Image: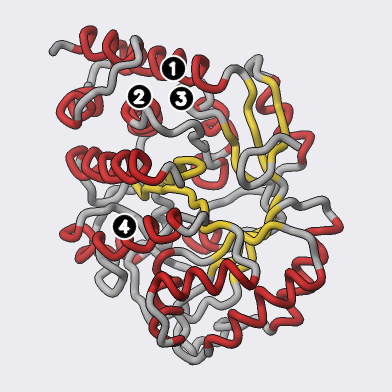
Amino acid sequence: MNLEEILLKAYEGKRITEDEALQLLKVESFYDVLKIGIVADKIREKKVGNVVTYVKNRNINYTNICINRCKFCAFRREEKDVDAYVLSIEEILKKVEEAVKCGAKEICIQGGINRKLEFDYYEKMLKEIKKRYNIHIHAFSPMEIYHLSKISGFKIYETLKYLKEIGLDSMPGTAAEILDDEIRKRICPEKIDTKTWIEIIKTAHKLGIKTTATILYGHVESYEHVIRHLSILRKIQDETKGFTEFIPLAFVHKKTELYRKFKSQPGSSSIYDIKLYSVSRIFLDNFRNIQASWVKLGRKMAQLMLNFGANDLGGLLIEENISREAGAVYEFPSEQEIRLLISQIGRIPKERDTLYNLV
């Protein structure tokens, strides 16, 4: 099929194939890129209208000590490093209280794989937050869940079931990076493999724990890797309907080993961003929400992606550490600034919660 035939097929609501999506992603002409983007924007409009959402939240990274050595990560520290840390439960609770006072609807909790932390640390964390505050806990990537399963002696199902019982409301679908084991061996060799990531995500969904879905792009991947990754996500969503949103994460390269030592791409180009968002909206026909991360893209590029398939700007983020450590430079936007970014392009700003209920 030629480009126009593929786009017409997508616009009419018919599912495009992996090969057709790859053909779209490989387009080089800027005018053809715009054609893809226009169709993606029309599909976005048909699916979610002109509302653009955001959430008031706070990221809490409970430790930066990590046994994994992911080459794209500049956040991790060794235990002996002077700036290594582990937050106490009281310090975590103080951060939650500050977030609640600022009107946050969500606490996102993630951290390094720290072998010194026992299971009761995580258990107490969830229980104490839920005992004191009425707030949604969005916590623990599949990598962290795998680690918690190992240190608790529970199977994945039992681990997730218990965490849900004591306060886990939803999960970030991070640690996905690129769901291809050859790429994972190059960029994050100690992390769980693709099969394990899928197993944990599908188990969470079957237990009623909603998750996000992510991709890390702009480093050493090919277009073929991207499409295979998107295909895995689409198949899971067909089966479980457990993903709340898709979040493309542009690689922040400046301070990472993957760029400095292994000469990866220096992040994505603006054209790659446009193609990735547009093709994702077209190919992921069973996803309602696609988020443009202002942390990764910058505010103006995130605003631009709202014209190429995205319908959400993510969190106000009272705190964020991982992208900043990798070299991202930004100031946290106010709610007024986020709403302005949305209204400047003729869209309707709406606050949401983690599960996309409008506030």
Q: Quadrant of the C terminus?
A: top right
Mark 3 to mark 4 CA distance (whole Å):
25 Å
What residue did someone put label 3 on?
309
In front: 39, or 132? 132
Up-down: is 63 above or below 318?
Answer: below
* x 32%, y 61%: residue: 199
Reading the image, the residue beneath label 2 is: 282
Q: Residue at x 35, y 15 (%)?
A: 13
Residue 188 figure quarter: bottom left
Q: Residue at x 20, y 27 (%)?
A: 17
Distance, label 4 to label 2, CA atoms, is 22 Å
Amino acid residing under circle 2: Ile
Question: Picture coordinates of residue 60 (x, y %)?
Answer: 64, 66
Residue at the disc numbered 1? 43
Q: Amino acid at mark 1?
A: Ile
Between label 4 and label 2, give the one nearer the viewer.
Answer: 4
> Which of the two labelled residues, at mark 3 and mark 4, occupies the earlier sequence position?
4
**CA gap, disc 3 to disc 1?**
7 Å
